[in-house]
Amino acid sequence: MIIEKSFVKNINFFIYKKKHLIIYIFIGILSLFVELGIRQILTGFFGEKSLLLHSSLFGGIIFAFYFNVKFNFHVPKPLLKRSLMYYVTISCVAYVVQFSVKKYVDFGSLSFEQKRFLISGMFFLIGYFFHLKFSFRDNIKVGVAIYANGYEDIKKIYEKIGPYPDFIHVDIIDNTMNQNALDTKLSKLEVVKAYWPNHQIHTHIMSKRPLNCLDDEIYKFSDIIYFHHESLDDKNKIISEIKKHKKTPGLVLHSINDYDDLENVTDNFSEILVLSIKECGVSGQNFEKKAFVLVDKLNSLNQRRKFKICVDGGIKSNLISKISSERVVSGSDVLSNKNPKNQIMRLQTMSRYEKG
């Protein structure tokens, strides 16, 4: 019985991890039918030898891109043009390569349609790899928040969510940001990394004096280290310290605050976190609608392509479709859910297209 449960658990996780590939295959097959259908129509008008028949490819490409963005990979709106450019380019190159193979390899008496399906299948995984690497590299990632303060049981959290999040977000807060903050336990970072060894760890330092919080434990187990724009320490020194340890510095912008010169504020950062709750270090708060305005302003900046946006706080599935960011962080909405793993998947997949 235990073996059966373990087997089902492993199968479910395999399907979950390969969900993008499974949906991509299904959409890819449908797009080939669309392409071949358009080709049949063009053949009726222009004959079998017309070069215009190759234009049917673009019908299949647009179909596949639209439905992949709609149901498979969520790409922030400001990055859709870039994503489409990569998708069309990679698909056209793949078509040329496949056409060359068809020209020089003898497939016997197979029809054009049969050859197209066969050759597409041969190059399918290569195309998927390049689309994943370039076309859909900005698809939304979902992280789960864990406090390094207080008495959260990391083992119990892992039992709830397993390896399902795309990354782990660790919150560290001191009494300069919240007078009721509990003592920080940086040793939790090592425990977090032990349970999620293959996940990126994003550490969010909520302190007006982040330099006092930076520690060997943070440097050792973190991939991205966020600090607040409102911190009193010299920002260049903070950035220098983080980069010296070969980690990525990230800037936190609080949605309840107003920022006049975002071009200048975000300069030199590749990671921006928008804190979308009112009070730092308090879980279970509602999403601040001002965060939508701040995210929109960030998305309109000239250097938008130079940084990624993460929205943290009050995240629920009915909000995902309204947030144009590469990452979101959810805490209580996932951890207090009856089925945390399913809730993570809702945030990652179809729920982002539900209207809230």
Image: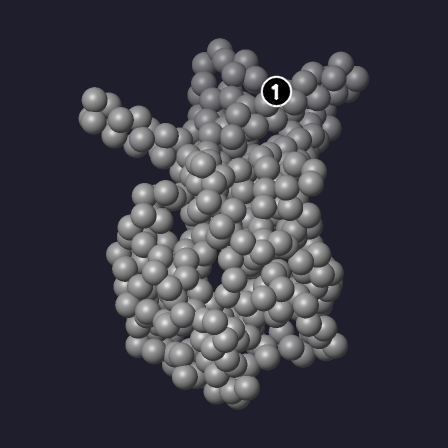
Number of other residues with Cα within 10 Å of mark 1, as a class: few under 14, some 14 to 19, many 20 or more: some
What residue did someone put label 1 on?
33
Nearer the observer, 151 or 208: 151
Residue 127 shows up from this direction: no
Q: Secondary structure at mark 1?
A: helix
- Residue at image coords 70%, 38%: 355
Q: Position of residue 99 (x, y in %)?
A: 54, 31
Q: Residue furthest right?
A: 45
Task: Answer with left or right where residue 329 lies relative to residue 53.
Answer: left
Give the vertical position of 290 relative to 240 (above or below): above
Image quadrant occupied by the N terminus: top left
Give the vertical position of 159 relative to 106 (above or below): below
- Residue at image coords 71%, 68%: 302
Q: Position of residue 263 (x, y in %)?
A: 69, 74
Task: Answer with left or right where residue 349 lies relative to residue 292.
Answer: left
Image quadrant occupied by the C terminus: top right
Task: Answer with left or right where residue 128 lies relative to residue 252.
Answer: left
- Residue at image coords 52%, 62%: 282
